[in-house]
């Protein structure tokens, strides 16, 4: 249903049946991960006037991966992440990626 790089990939679906009998399938709510559970690969500085999608394109190679940067920071408005030039943002991998460990975990 979704690309492998989508934030919605793997989420469960549900159905709703309207009064007219039509059934609609939808994706259940996505809960962002706790930023502390994400493994930091590096930190990079925001350029003056840079939008989050441009930052993602520059550091992740895809502007549509801006959600990964937003997930790594506890913000209500993702645009706030790039409001201050020079701010350093975490570039992370999702928790559980092979070869990485969540905070407090050790190699076994």
Image (tube, rainbow, N blue to C red):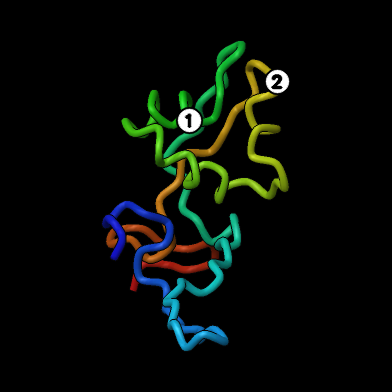
Q: Residue at x 57, y 44 (%)?
A: 70
Residue 78 at x, y = what percent? Answer: 64, 39
**Residue 19 appears left or right of 61:** right
Q: Callout 2: few (<14), some (14-19), or many (20+) C-alpha neighbours within 10 Å?
A: some
Foreground tag (1 vs 2): 1
Does label 1 or label 2 sit earlier along the sequence? Answer: 1
The number of numbered badges drawn on the structure is: 2
Residue 92 at x, y = what percent? Answer: 45, 46
| Residue most extreme to the front | 20
Q: Residue at x 50, y 56 (%)?
A: 38
According to the picture, the residue beneath numbered tag 2 turns out to be: 84
Q: Which image quadrant: the C terminus?
A: bottom left
**Residue 105 appears left or right of 97:** right
Label disc, if present, on residue 44 of the rendered structure: none
How far is mark 1 from mark 2, CA to CA? 15 Å
According to the picture, the residue beneath numbered tag 1 turns out to be: 53
Q: Residue at x 40, y 51 (%)?
A: 93
């Amino acid at each position: 249903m979704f690309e492998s790089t989508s934030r919605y990939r793997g989420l469960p679906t549900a159905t709703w049946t309207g009064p007219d009998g039509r059934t609609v399938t939808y994706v259940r709510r996505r809960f962002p991960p706790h930023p502390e559970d994400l493994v930091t690969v590096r930190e990079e500085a925001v350029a003056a006037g840079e939008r989050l999608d441009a930052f993602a394109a520059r550091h992740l190679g895809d502007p549509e991966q801006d959600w990964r940067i937003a997930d790594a920071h506890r913000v209500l408005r993702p645009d706030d992440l790039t409001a201050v030039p020079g701010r350093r943002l975490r570039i992370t991998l999702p928790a559980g990626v092979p070869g990485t460990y969540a905070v407090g975990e050790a190699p076994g």
